[in-house]
Image (cartoon, rainbow, N blue to C red):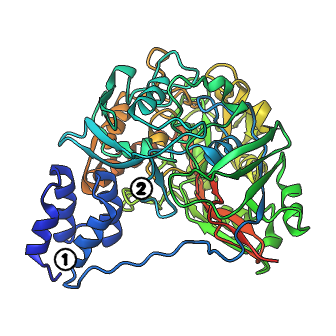
C-alpha cells in the first residue's frame, strides 16, 4: 500500500481513538476498503474524510462524483407503489411489521440511514462520535430542518423521541438493555449524548433506519395520534391514509434537502403477494416493494427492473427449550440435521439466498466467522441423536408459522424432512395479523408455541438478532421479549454482550465464532437460509431505492410515458 503519511496525518487530526483505530486496521491491511468505509462510518468518520483516507493510501488525489438515482426527466409524476398491508395502526412506537415501517419512512426520518451496502449515511444527524469505551455516543443534529408543521428540529425532539422509546413502561421499549431514559441527555440545542447501559460498538446502527421505530418525532407528539398527520421532517407529506386500503403523499415543498422528484406517491396495500404481483404485471402499480421468487417468478423474465439485495433477512424456526422433548439439545440438533439447506435455497429461492448455519450471523455480515464448519444434512446422525435422547420412535408436535411469502412452503419442507426421524409435525399457518396477535410476550401464538416459524427482516449488524430473540427472558428489563425458544444460557448472554461491546472487526469475528459454535451445539433456533430482498418496478420507472429491511424510498423516482 502506497501511503501519503503527511496527508493521512492531516486526516487523522481531530479524529478520536476509535476512528484512528479503524484507520490503523486499514493501513495495516487487516480490513478491506469496503470495511474501512463501513466501520469508519459507524465510528463517525465523515464520508469526505473516508474518501481522503482512501486516496492517501493509494497515492492518488481524491476525486468524487455524485449522481442521483433519479433524473430531472420525468419528474413531477405520480409513482404508484404496492406494499404489504400494515398489520395495525401506524404508531411509531408499536409498528413491528414491514408495511408499517414502510409507512413510517415516507414522512419520518432517522438520525442516519443504513443503505444498500450496509453503510451508514447522515440524515438528521450530521455526525457522531464515541468515547474510547464506546459507552457514550454524541450526535450532532442537523440545523435548518423543520417538521411539516413548520416547527424547527432541535435536540429536544431527539431527546423526547429516545426517552419515549427507552421507557421500560413503553409498549415497545425498542432499546431495552441498551439505553434508559436518563441516559438520553441534551448537551446543547443541537447536540445529544447517549450514555449507554453497556459498551456498544455498533450503536449508530440502532439510531438508523435499521431500527425502524426510531423516526424523530416532534417534542410532545403523542405516538398514538401520529396516524392522523404522519408528521415528520421527510420529503413527502401525508395527503390521505385509509386503513387496509392505501395512502397518498405529496411533495414537501419546504424540505430541508433535495426536493422529491415525484409530485405525489400512491401506495396500495396488499394482504397477499399474488394480487400485488398481478397489479404490477397488469400496470395498476409501477413499483412492487417486495416479492419472492416463489410468488413472482414471472417478474424475473427481464421485463422489469429488479433490485436484488443480499441481506440478513431470515426465518427463525424456534423450538421451546423449556418444553419436552425440546429440553434436550440432541433433539433440536436432530431436527436441524434433517434439512438439505442448499436444496432449500435452490427450490424456494432459485439461488437468491445464502445457506444458513443455525446462528444469526448471515454471510453478508463482515463479522460472520466463516471458519465455523457448515451444518449439513445427515439423517444417520440425526437418528443416532434421537436414539441417544430416548426418542428413537419419534414424537408428535405442533408448529405455528406466519403465512407470508415462502414460509408456508418452508414449513411443509420442515414437516416432510422431520418424518425421516419419526417426528410428526402438524403445521398451523396464520396470516400476520393473527399470528402476531397483540405483539407482546405471552399474547401471541408464536411466542407460546412448542415450535414457531417467524420472519425476521434485514439488519445491517446482527445486534438485534443476538439480543431479544436469544437472550434470557427478563420481564423486568424487557430483554428476551422475542425469545420464542425460551433459550436460557448465561454463557450465551455474556458472549452476546461481549460481541456488542466490541469495536474492532477482528474482535467481533473472534466472538462471533464462539457464538456460532455455541448455537450449533445448543440449536435453540434453526436458521436455514438468509434470503435476498427482491423489489421490482416497470421499465419506464427509474430512481427507486429499496432497502433490504423493507423501506421503499421514492423521492428520486421518475416515470416516463
Is 226 on the left-hand or right-hand side of 477? right
Where does residue 154 sit, x and y in percent of width and height? Answer: 41, 35
Where does residue 22 sit, x and y in percent of width and height? Answer: 22, 59
Q: Can residue 112 be seen in this view?
A: yes
> Which residue corresponds to the image point at 17% horizontal and 65% vertical from the top-left?
11
Q: Is residue 397 visible?
A: no
Identify the residue under disc 2: 120
Q: Is residue 10 above or below residue 419?
A: below
Q: Distance between the residues labelled 1 and 2?
A: 22 Å
> Which residue corresponds to the image point at 88% horizontal and 61% vertical from the top-left?
279
Q: In this view, does 342 lie above or below 97?
A: below
Q: Secondary structure under badge 2?
A: strand
Tell me the quarter of the image containing the N terminus.
bottom left
Q: Which residue lies furthest to the left in this view?
A: 6
Identify the residue under disc 1: 56
CB atoms of marks 1 and 2 within 8 Å: no
Splitting the image into 4 quarters, where does residue 193 fall?
A: top left
Of residues 519 and 254, the one nearer the viewer is 254
Q: Residues within 10 Å of mark 2 (few under 14, many from 20)?
A: many
Of residues 450 and 208, the one nearer the viewer is 208
Tell me the quarter of the image containing the C terminus.
bottom right
Is 55 on the left-hand or right-hand side of 294? left
Splitting the image into 4 quarters, where does residue 285 fall?
A: bottom right
Where does residue 357 sit, x and y in percent of width and height? Answer: 50, 54
Where does residue 16 sit, x and y in percent of width and height? Answer: 17, 50
Q: Secondary structure under badge 1?
A: helix
> Which residue corresponds to the image point at 24% horizontal and 78% vertical from the top-left?
55
Q: In this view, does 92 lie above or below 438?
A: below
Marks counted in the figure total: 2
Is 247 on the left-hand or right-hand side of 130? right
Amino acid at each position: 500500500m502506497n501511503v501519503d503519511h503527511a496527508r493521512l496525518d492531516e486526516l487523522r487530526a481531530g479524529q478520536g481513538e476509535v476512528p484512528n483505530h479503524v484507520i490503523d486496521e486499514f493501513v495495516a491491511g487487516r480490513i478491506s476498503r469496503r470495511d474501512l468505509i463501513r466501520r469508519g462510518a459507524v465510528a463517525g468518520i465523515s464520508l469526505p474524510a473516508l474518501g481522503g483516507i482512501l486516496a492517501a493510501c493509494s497515492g492518488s488525489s481524491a476525486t468524487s462524483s455524485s449522481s442521483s438515482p433519479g433524473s430531472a426527466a420525468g419528474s413531477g409524476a405520480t409513482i404508484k407503489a404496492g406494499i404489504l398491508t400494515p398489520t395495525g395502526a401506524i404508531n411509531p412506537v408499536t409498528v413491528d411489521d414491514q408495511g408499517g415501517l414502510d409507512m413510517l419512512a415516507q414522512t419520518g426520518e432517522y438520525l442516519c440511514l443504513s443503505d444498500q451496502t450496509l453503510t451508514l449515511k447522515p440524515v438528521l444527524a450530521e455526525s457522531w462520535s464515541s468515547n474510547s469505551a464506546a459507552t457514550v455516543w454524541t450526535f450532532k443534529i442537523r440545523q435548518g430542518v423543520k417538521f411539516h408543521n413548520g416547527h424547527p428540529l432541535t435536540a429536544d425532539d431527539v431527546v423526547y423521541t429516545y426517552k419515549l422509546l427507552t421507557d421500560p413502561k413503553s409498549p415497545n421499549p425498542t432499546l431495552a438493555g441498551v439505553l434508559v431514559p436518563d441516559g438520553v441527555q441534551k448537551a446543547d440545542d443541537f447536540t445529544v449524548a447517549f450514555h449507554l447501559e453497556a459498551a456498544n460498538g455498533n450503536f449508530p446502527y440502532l439510531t438508523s433506519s435499521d431500527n425502524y421505530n426510531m423516526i424523530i418525532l416532534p417534542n410532545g407528539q403523542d405516538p398514538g395520534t401520529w396516524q392522523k398527520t404522519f408528521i415528520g421532517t421527510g420529503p413527502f407529506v401525508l395527503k390521505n391514509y385509509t386503513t387496509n386500503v392505501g395512502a397518498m403523499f405529496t411533495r414537501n415543498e419546504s424540505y430541508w434537502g433535495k426536493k422529491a422528484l415525484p409530485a405525489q406517491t400512491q401506495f396500495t396495500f396488499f394482504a397477499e403477494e399474488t394480487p400485488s404481483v398481478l397489479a404490477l404485471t397488469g400496470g395498476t402499480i409501477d413499483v412492487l416493494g417486495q416479492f419472492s421468487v416463489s410468488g413472482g417468478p414471472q417478474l424475473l423474465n427481464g421485463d422489469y427492473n429488479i433490485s436484488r439485495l443480499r441481506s440478513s433477512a431470515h426465518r427463525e424456526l424456534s423450538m421451546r427449550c423449556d418444553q419436552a422433548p425440546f429440553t434436550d439439545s440432541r433433539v433440536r440438533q436432530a431436527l436441524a440435521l434433517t434439512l438439505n439447506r442448499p436444496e432449500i435455497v435452490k427450490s424456494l429461492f432459485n439461488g437468491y439466498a445464502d445457506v444458513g448455519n443455525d446462528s444469526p450471523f448471515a454471510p453478508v455480515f463482515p463479522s460472520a466467522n466463516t471458519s465455523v464448519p457448515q451444518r449439513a444434512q445427515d439423517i444417520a446422525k440425526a437418528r443416532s441423536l434421537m436414539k441417544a435422547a430416548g426418542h428413537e420412535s419419534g414424537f408428535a408436535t405442533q408448529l405455528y408459522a406466519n403465512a407470508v411469502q415462502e414460509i408456508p412452503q418452508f414449513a411443509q419442507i420442515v414437516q416432510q424432512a422431520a418424518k425421516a426421524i419419526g417426528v410428526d409435525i402438524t403445521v398451523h399457518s396464520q396470516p400476520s395479523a393473527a399470528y402476531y396477535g397483540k405483539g407482546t410476550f405471552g399474547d401471541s401464538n408464536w411466542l407460546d408455541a412448542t415450535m414457531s416459524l417467524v420472519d425476521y427482516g434485514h439488519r445491517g449488524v446482527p445486534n438485534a438478532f443476538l439480543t431479544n430473540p436469544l437472550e434470557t427472558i427478563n420481564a423486568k428489563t424487557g430483554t428476551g421479549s422475542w425469545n420464542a425458544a425460551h433459550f436460557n444460557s448465561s454463557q450465551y448472554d455474556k458472549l452476546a454482550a461481549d460481541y456488542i461491546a466490541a469495536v474492532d472487526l477482528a474482535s467481533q469475528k473472534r466472538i462471533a465464532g464462539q457464538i456460532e459454535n455455541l448455537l450449533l451445539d445448543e440449536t435453540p433456533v434453526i436458521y436455514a437460509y438468509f434470503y435476498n430482498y427482491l423489489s421490482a418496478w416497470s421499465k419506464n420507472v427509474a430512481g427507486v431505492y429499496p432497502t433490504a429491511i423493507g423501506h421503499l424510498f421514492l423521492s428520486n423516482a421518475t416515470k416516463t410515458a
